Image (spheres, rainbow, N blue to C red):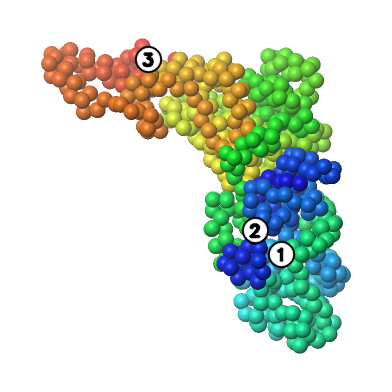
């Protein structure tokens, strides 16, 4: 099968290869990944295109890998791609070494070297699950995380003191097993703590002992060298068996993904450097970002699935219903509409969707309340197909100048966007979504007089999209301009105000077409704003954001000189009238108002009630 890689686990073998000291040749980087299937062979029946999977896959730093289906397993639905990428190499190695090779039993004891590394932490969990007494080495700064895993005996991996200390703790008996990844003098020191009939399992890649060297130091013990990639090549069905056993443990919660540090593909050098310097704990994961070359692939992956559920917040409003109807036309059969109320007009449109064969579930819930949102997700999990997409379209307006925006008015607008989006994010981090779309506003790009709360709320959505993207999670923030006829802005009569500033409206038909297009793209944030450039730029008042579009301006000093000439040529009372008119025009443009909407010139700007009239 062919997999579109979403996240790749970085392993020490990649570092050895990168610096040219790997004792054998490879022609690729990466040994494991999590991603989505884009093609399957004719004999593959257990997987289908679009399935989210985890794989032990050579060359997995590529955007696509083709791999034997036996080395692939379905991704646990509660885990993200980033979390899932911490599983294959480390947990299969630990599972194979401890259960297949060592055949550990409850009551055995084991020394796990570099226990804060990926394979080390996987081995700690598996050994504890099997009832073993664990002894571990790690650098002192990493001891705390091992204590959180319940490891009682921890020793310094930077010196050989562990050997003497373990023998003292065990009254000279030593341990049953050693899982080793250290080299040099650490090998004899580790052999010294093995019981007479103990078992030494080597998972290191360089400076390792062969069987003869081991027997010279410690006769009568068992010795095995584990190479996971050789096992995968020679016994792929065994790897499939191990993957199935592991995934059962992850599904039940008995095993947990490794702590991870995430880098983007653009920061690959930094990821390699961190591992080379052993600065990380657990796993380093590289999140892949798609390029334009993958547009065709992304189009396929982001299609609407009939046997999937799609959630829309603000779903009973005009904007949310437009989105719901568009999803239904594209093939969605299960829609969840969430809002605080169900207006009468919404009921008619919802009934029409249901009459057309669409399963529409409505929740009267507040997205700012995590417990209400969690209840909705629990209902989806119990009664509906898997959740594949979220569109956060909820939002309200309460405009006013900053001095009038008290805490209540700020929270009223910001909570729906900020708390709502964050609740959706936290409750679905481990849900394999195809998309997570947030309806932001052009206001966070351009600014908007009297809408500081609205601007701040939407800026958070833009930032959350970038954060999710850095975590390898789907995210898109759309900075919409004003929609005509529907949406909070249209209801507030902002259309005329925006038109005066050179910003036109988006019709519902246009908006839905654009949304459908953006669902298939790989961008994280995009502004959708119909702009009349000549009208906007001729006003002379435009944000710096548009500076590169402004090719010809009238120098300010020339405008000032003309005004000065006019003022000096007029009598005092006429000059006052001209100056007053000039200032009113300037203020009106800044505030997006017409001259007749301004207050009387005798009203101070501390009296702001007029702005809401």
Q: Which residue is mark 2?
A: 28
Of callouts 3 and 1, which one flags the residue occurring earlier in the amino acid sequence? 1
- Report helix, strand or loop for mark 1: helix
Q: Nearer the viewer, residue 411 or 58?
A: 58
Question: Looking at the rendered structure, which numbered label has been put on residue 119?
Answer: 1
Report whether 483 appears left or right of 558. Answer: right
Q: Nearer the viewer, residue 595 or 104?
A: 104
Q: CA distance from mark 3 to mark 2?
A: 65 Å
Report whether 173 appears left or right of 452. Answer: right
Q: Position of residue 245 (x, y in %)?
A: 84, 56
Report whether 25 appears left or right of 93. Answer: left
Q: Position of residue 431 (x, y in %)?
A: 72, 42
- Report helix, strand or loop for mark 2: loop
Q: Is residue 525 above or below residue 530?
A: below
- Report helix, strand or loop for mark 3: loop
Residue drawn at x 82%, y 33% as measured from the top left: 383
Q: Position of residue 375 (x, y in %)?
A: 75, 36
Q: Which residue is mark 3?
A: 594
Quarter of the image for residue 230 reads bottom right
Viewer-nearest of discs 3 and 2: 2
């Amino acid at each position: 099968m062919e997999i579109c890689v979403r996240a790749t686990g970085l392993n020490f073998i990649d570092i050895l290869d990168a610096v040219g000291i790997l004792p054998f040749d490879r022609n690729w980087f990466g040994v494991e990944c999590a991603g989505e299937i884009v093609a399957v062979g004719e004999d593959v029946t257990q997987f289908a295109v679009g399935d989210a999977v985890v794989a032990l896959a050579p060359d997995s730093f590529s955007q696509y890998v083709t791999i034997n289906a036996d080395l692939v397993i379905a991704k646990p639905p509660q885990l993200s791609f980033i979390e899932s990428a911490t599983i294959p190499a480390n947990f299969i190695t630990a599972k194979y070494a401890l259960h297949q090779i060592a055949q550990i039993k409850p009551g055995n004891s084991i020394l796990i070297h570099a226990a804060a590394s990926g394979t080390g932490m996987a081995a700690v969990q598996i050994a504890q699950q099997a009832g073993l007494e664990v002894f571990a080495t790690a650098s002192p700064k990493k001891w705390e995380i091992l204590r959180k895993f319940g490891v009682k005996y921890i020793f310094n991996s930077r010196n050989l003191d562990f050997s003497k200390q373990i023998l003292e703790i065990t009254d000279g008996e030593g341990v049953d097993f050693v899982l080793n990844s250290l080299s040099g003098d650490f090998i004899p020191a580790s052999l010294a703590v093995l019981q007479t009939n103990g078992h030494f399992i080597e998972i290191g890649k360089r400076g390792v002992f062969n069987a003869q060297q081991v027997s010279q130091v410690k006769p009568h013990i068992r010795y095995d060298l584990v190479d996971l990639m050789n096992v995968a090549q020679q016994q792929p069905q065994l790897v499939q068996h191990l993957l199935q056993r592991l995934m059962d443990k992850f599904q039940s919660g008995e095993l947990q993904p490794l702590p991870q540090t995430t880098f983007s593909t653009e920061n690959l050098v930094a990821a390699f450097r961190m591992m080379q310097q052993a600065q990380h704990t657990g796993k380093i994961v590289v999140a892949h970002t798609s390029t334009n070359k993958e547009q065709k692939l992304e189009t396929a992956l982001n299609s609407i699935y009939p046997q999937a559920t799609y959630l829309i917040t603000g779903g009973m409003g005009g904007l949310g219903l437009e989105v719901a109807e568009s999803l239904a036309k594209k093939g969605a059969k299960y829609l969840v509409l969430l809002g605080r109320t169900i207006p009468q007009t919404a009921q008619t449109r919802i009934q029409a969707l249901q009459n057309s064969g669409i399963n529409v579930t409505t929740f009267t819930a507040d997205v700012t309340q995590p417990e209400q949102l969690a209840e909705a997700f629990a209902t989806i999990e119990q009664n509906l197909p898997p959740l594949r997409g979220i569109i956060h379209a909820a939002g309200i307006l309460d405009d006013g100048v900053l001095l009038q925006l008290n805490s209540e008015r700020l929270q009223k607008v910001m909570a729906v966007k900020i708390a709502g989006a964050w609740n959706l994010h936290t409750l679905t981090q481990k849900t394999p979504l195809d998309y997570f779309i947030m309806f932001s506003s052009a206001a966070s790009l351009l600014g908007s007089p009297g809408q500081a709360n609205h601007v701040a709320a939407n800026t958070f959505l833009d930032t959350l999209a970038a954060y999710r993207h850095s975590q390898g999670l789907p995210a898109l923030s759309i900075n919409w301009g004003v929609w005509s006829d529907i949406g909070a802005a249209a209801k507030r009569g902002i259309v005329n105000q925006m038109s005066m500033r050179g910003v036109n409206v988006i019709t519902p038909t246009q908006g839905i077409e654009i949304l459908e297009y953006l669902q298939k793209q790989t961008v994280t944030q995009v502004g959708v704003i119909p702009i009349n450039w000549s009208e906007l730029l001729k006003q002379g008042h435009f944000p710096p954001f548009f500076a590169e579009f402004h090719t010809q301006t009238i120098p300010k000093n020339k405008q000032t000189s003309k005004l000065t000439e006019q003022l000096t040529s007029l009598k005092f009372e006429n000059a006052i009238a001209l100056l007053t008119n000039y200032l009113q025009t300037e203020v009106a443009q800044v505030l997006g108002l017409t001259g007749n909407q301004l207050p009387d010139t005798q009203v101070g700007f501390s009296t702001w009630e007029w702005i809401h009239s």
